Image: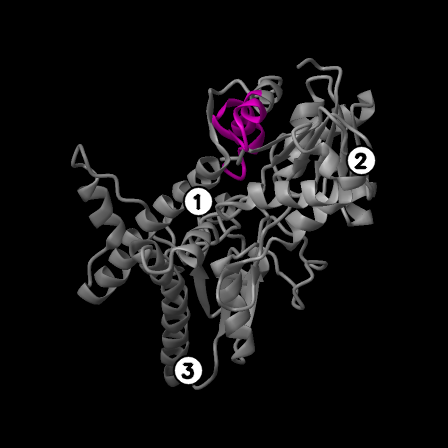
Amino acid sequence: MNNNIKVIMMGLGYIGLPTAALIASKGIQVLGVDVQQSVVDTINNGKIHIVEPALDGLVKHDVERGYLKASTSAAKADVFLIAVSTPFKGNNHEPDLKYVESATRMILPYLEEGNLFIIESTSPVGTTEKMASLIFSERPELKGKIHIAYCPERVLPGNVIYELKNNDRAIGGIDQASTEKASDFYRLFVTGELHQTNARTAEMTKLVENSSRDGQIAFANELSMICDEADIDVWELIKLANKHPRVNILQPGTGVGGHCIAVDPWFIVSEFKEKAKIIRTAREINNYKTEWVIEKIKNKALEFELKEGRKPVIACFGLAFKPDIDDLRESPALYVVQSLIKQGFEVLAVEPNVNTQNNGLGFCFVTLDSALEQMDLGFKLVGHKEFRKLPEDIIKFVNG
């Protein structure tokens, strides 16, 4: 496979846009498709709608050179990539494939013999086969004539461009020919090693990676709650325990957020309810940690009220799901703030990575300086770099 191909990227979010930009930077024609006209217009103006280091310059360069364009509709191409979200449906953490299916249906009229169809969206095991069945049921003449594969991203927000290029990838097709075809494509822009497997194994690989991380974080979060009751500094404890050459305890926090670690384990639990016991327990511990944080804040507020005779002004520092990004998806810190506001507390929310006014949350953020001037109690929920020199009396639920 050479650079003289056309690529369609379905979804221009936190993964789709960086991936499209990286592919376009290699001199490959990329059309990004998104249902939001505002996103399309922003990208076609050489700008970005998310916070990710190095992405703005890359998109601007790609658009100016004519290799990256955006649209609300698909077109004919050689390669079709699906990078849309996979949320839950209902309250039982059941995966919802409506966006993956919708994106697949959008490109159905444009598929031709020899095309390569790849799903990158985090998905339950069997999703690639389901989409293949959908394609062949609607376009039976394409059976055996196109290649279908799954290849999950494994990147860290804040370092996405580098990791998309340099990290290893697991690539699994519905048959060996599809695996080979997809591998040829990723070699055009990925320098990391490409590990060939089948679609089901590639799908499970992504879920297992994040479930493993979730379990490690759950241990740290559970430890932090134990240490609070035992009057032990959990940060010092972890630092000392990690001096052991074979121990590497992670840092506790407000909970676990984002569209990967907080979501992917449930995809395994939903399909293997009786077997996924540790995976389910880890999810429950990390979710409980967020509720525990809320209760700790409420208790401090009650202590203040009993002492001062009035309710405190509470400042919460950080709302993104991890440090130094703008991503609020599944954020435990955001949940803490929303819960406190619903319960009648006066909360000053500080999130330097998101627009202070037009955040779409129903409340405005305040600046760091304003919060420090007005607050009675302060709580560090996310370890943004802007918060590293907060006063000592700020109660910390994350290190740094």
Task: Please report the residue visible at 38 percent of the width from the left and 53 percent of the height from the top.
Answer: 398
The x, y position of residue 200, in whole percent, is 47, 39
Q: Secondary structure at mark 2?
A: helix
Q: Which residue is mark 2?
A: 110
Residue sitting nearer the eye, 232 or 78: 78
Query: Who comes first in sequence, dot 1 or dot 3?
Result: 1
State the separation of the CA atoms marked 1 and 2: 30 Å
State the separation of the CA atoms marked 3 and 2: 64 Å
Magenta range is 156-180
Residue extending farthest top: 2
Q: Is residue 132 above or below residue 301?
A: above
Q: Is residue 226 above or below residue 399?
A: below
Q: Is residue 12 visible?
A: no
Task: Please report the residue visible at 52 percent of the width from the left and 24 percent of the height from the top.
Answer: 176
Q: Which residue is mark 3?
A: 305
Q: Nearer the viewer, mark 3 or mark 2?
A: 2
Q: What is the tally of numbered marks visible in this picture?
A: 3
The x, y position of residue 354, in whole percent, is 64, 51
Q: Which residue is mark 1?
A: 207
Q: Is residue 167 magenta?
A: yes
